[in-house]
Image (cartoon, grey):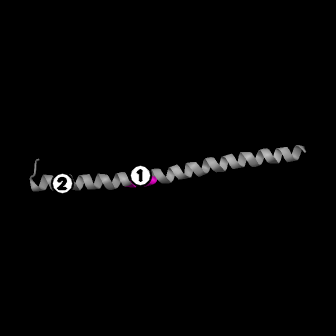
Amino acid sequence: MKERTLMNALLIILAVIAVILLFVGGFAASLKFLLWVGVVLLVIAVIAWLLRTLTGRRS
């Protein structure tokens, strides 16, 4: 009986750790995606600023 309770506790701990790692992995993937979106937006902003500066439009 004692061994069964210990195994149940270990399985619950393993399940909780698995869920936490799943969420951390999802957050890391989404942060990586958002980092790339930020880089792309920064490049677009720099290109737009360069075009505005080189063409002489000040409005």
Q: Is residue 28 left or right of residue 43?
A: right
Point out the stretch of residues depicted in magenta. 32-36
Amino acid under disc 2: Leu
Residue visible at 16% across and 56% down in the picture: 51
Position of residue 53 measured from the top left corner of the image (x, y, whole percent):
13, 52
Discs 2/1, front: 1
Residue visible at 28% across and 55% down in the picture: 43
Position of residue 27 measured from the top left corner of the image (x, y, whole percent):
51, 49
Q: Earlier in the sequence, mark 2 or mark 1?
A: 1
Q: Determine whether the residue tagged by mark 2 lies in a helix, strand or loop.
A: helix
Amino acid under disc 1: Leu
Q: Which mark is residue 50?
A: 2
Q: Name the residue carrying label 1.
A: 34
- The answer to which image quadrant residue 36 occupies is bottom left
Q: Which mark is residue 19?
A: none
Position of residue 8 measured from the top left corner of the image (x, y, whole percent):
80, 47
Label the magenta part by its dominant secondary structure: helix
Outermost residue toward the left in this view: 56
Task: Classify 54 as above or below 20.
Answer: below
